[in-house]
Image (cartoon, rainbow, N blue to C red):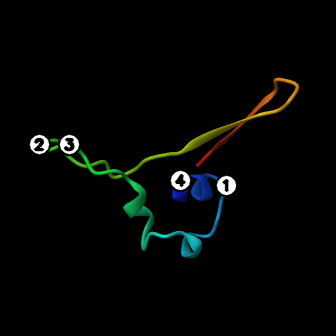
Amino acid sequence: MDAISFVLAEKTSNLRVKTLKDLIHGAPVGKPAANRAFVSMVYCEDNGDECTFTR
């Protein structure tokens, strides 16, 4: 839910995480953790048109 709220530009204070960094999933053991990420959501209209939201 937080990823959907984030991509739709919800205020950070309304998310369940304390910082945006908490939204980034941890890295597998032995690999460095990512320091940035993005979320994309594709909304499909009834007529087949698509609208992509990315943040």
Q: Which mark is residue 42?
A: none
Kindly report the distance in space between the C-alpha atoms of the residues bearing marks 4 and 1: 9 Å
Q: Which mark is residue 3?
A: 4
Q: Quadrant of residue 53?
A: top right
Kindly report the distance in space between the C-alpha atoms of the residues bearing marks 1 and 3: 28 Å
Q: Quadrant of residue 52?
A: top right
In what element is the residue under mark 2? loop
Disc on the earlier residue, 4 or 1:
4
Task: Name the residue: 42% across, 74% down.
Answer: 18
How dense is the environment of label 4, judged by Cα within 10 Å: few (below 14), some, or many (20 and up)? some
Disc on the earlier residue, 3 or 4:
4
Kindly report the distance in space between the C-alpha atoms of the residues bearing marks 3 and 2: 6 Å
Residue identifier under label 1: 8
Q: Quadrant of residue 9?
A: bottom right
Residue identifier under label 3: 28
Q: Nearer the viewer, mark 4 or mark 2?
A: 4
Q: Are marks 3 and 2 in contact (CB under 8 Å)?
A: yes
Q: Are marks 4 and 2 in contact (CB under 8 Å)?
A: no
Disc on the earlier residue, 1 or 2:
1
Kindly report the distance in space between the C-alpha atoms of the residues bearing marks 1 and 2: 33 Å
How dense is the environment of label 2, judged by Cα within 10 Å: few (below 14), some, or many (20 and up)? few
In what element is the residue under mark 1? loop
Disc on the earlier residue, 4 or 2:
4
Task: Name the residue: 20% across, 46% down.
Answer: 32
Amino acid residing under circle 3: Pro
Amino acid residing under circle 1: Leu
Amino acid residing under circle 2: Gly
How dense is the environment of label 3, judged by Cα within 10 Å: few (below 14), some, or many (20 and up)? few
